[in-house]
Amino acid sequence: MSLARRLLAEGPQSVVVAPMGGRFLQVERVRTSADAGGRRTFRAVLGFDSEAPEGSDTQAFLSGAITVTPLRFDWTDEAALQRLRGWKLGEQR
């Protein structure tokens, strides 16, 4: 029985607070095509990992738990940002 069907039938097994771990979705390949007007499109073909790091949110989810994982969405590379500011790109010459 798939995870989705099991959760619908049985409900979640537990609620787990865990760190983010692993990448559940994997881009297996990218399909390209062109329409009649010559415009190209790109579509990702996704696959799913069946393994997850020990103690991760992905492992808990795959075992049927509801997972709570606080995330930070700012992926800014602060060190690179400081280096780029040193280039003075926005100044008039």
Image (cartoon, rainbow, N blue to C red):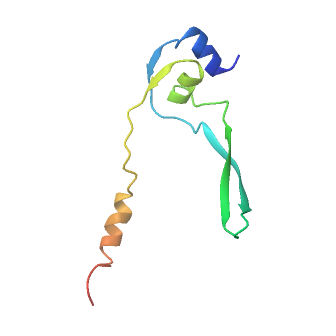
In the rendered view, tell whether residue 66 sits above or below residue 93: above
Residue drawn at x 38%, y 33% is: 70
Residue 54 in picture, x, y percent from top left: 56, 27
Residue drawn at x 38%, y 64% is: 80
Query: Which residue reaches farthest left?
Result: 92
Query: Which residue reaches farthest front?
Result: 36
Q: Which quadrant of the figure contains the C terminus?
A: bottom left
Q: Nearer the viewer, residue 65 or 78?
A: 65
Quadrant of the rendered image containing residue 34 = bottom right
Residue 63 in picture, x, y percent from top left: 59, 19
17 relative position to 86: left or right: right
Q: Nearer the viewer, residue 77 or 8?
A: 8
In the rendered view, tell whether residue 7 sits above or below residue 89: above
31 relative position to 85: left or right: right
Quadrant of the rendered image containing residue 5 = top right
24 relative position to 75: left or right: right
Residue 72 in picture, x, y percent from top left: 37, 42
Residue drawn at x 58%, y 15% is: 8
Query: Which residue reaches farthest top?
Result: 10
Residue drawn at x 53%, y 11% is: 11
Q: Which quadrant of the figure contains the N terminus?
A: top right
- Tell how many labels: 0
Residue 46 in picture, x, y percent from top left: 67, 43
Quadrant of the rendered image containing residue 30 = bottom right
